[in-house]
Amino acid sequence: MDSKNKLPAPSKEFMRAVVDESSIVIDCEFCDRTHFIGDGADYDEGEFENLIKKSELEPEKYIFHNLSSISWGRLGGKQVVEGCPCNEASKYEQLFWDSRYVIADYFSSKSKKLQGQANYEVGLAKKVKSSLKQIQNTTF
């Protein structure tokens, strides 16, 4: 993607909501870039050196971060890495923001439906409990 069509970075607020994992090495499943941190991490023998060599050959694909870990989360079932230059998370952020009223209406109606189902289940549980008490009080 050329710089003219480059996506804007997602907001810190959005990524804070998305990110819930961290790793020493992780692939962004939106662009297939591999992100990794320094050799002080718990790599298998030769793994860090291999990543460094790959990053020298393909610096756009293998990205070194001078951090203690790489933060990532999931969007649409794919791993998304905080700070990845593909910025694919911004598409989701824009979709969510543009659809916020639809999403709010959906959550509201879905919550009401689930509340109704929960109330029905509570009623059934009370009937079962009442029936059990009647059985316990019956002598044969």
Image (cartoon, helix red, strand yellow):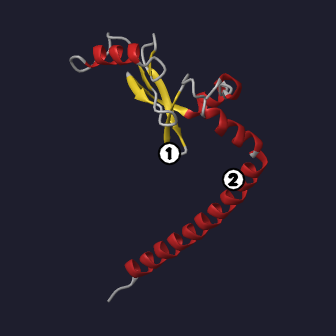
Residue for point 66% across, 22% down: 3
Residue for point 35% across, 86% down: 139
Which SS class for mark 1?
loop
Whole-percent x and y of residue 16? 59, 28
Whole-percent x and y of residue 126? 53, 71
**Residue 92 position (above or below residue 48):** below
Residue 47 placement: quadrant: top left
Other residues around mark 2 within 10 Å, as few (<14) / some (14–19) / many (≥20): few
Instruction: Indicate which disc, 1 or 2, sits on the residue closer to the N terminus.
Output: 1
Instruction: Indicate left or right for 104 with 83 as reference.
Output: right
Whole-percent x and y of residue 35? 44, 22
Residue 41 placement: quadrant: top left
Instruction: Indicate left or right for 77 with 135 as reference.
Output: right
Q: Nearer the viewer, residue 86 or 9?
A: 86
Name the residue tied to disc 2.
Answer: 107
Residue for point 65% across, 28% down: 10
Which numbered disc covers residue 98? none
Give the spatial CA distance, label 1 vs label 2.
20 Å
Residue 89 placement: quadrant: top right
> Split into 4 quadrants, where in the image is the C terminus?
bottom left
Q: Nearer the viewer, residue 122 or 57?
A: 57
Name the residue tied to disc 1.
Answer: 77
Amino acid type of the residue that numbered disc 1 sits on in the rendered structure:
Gly
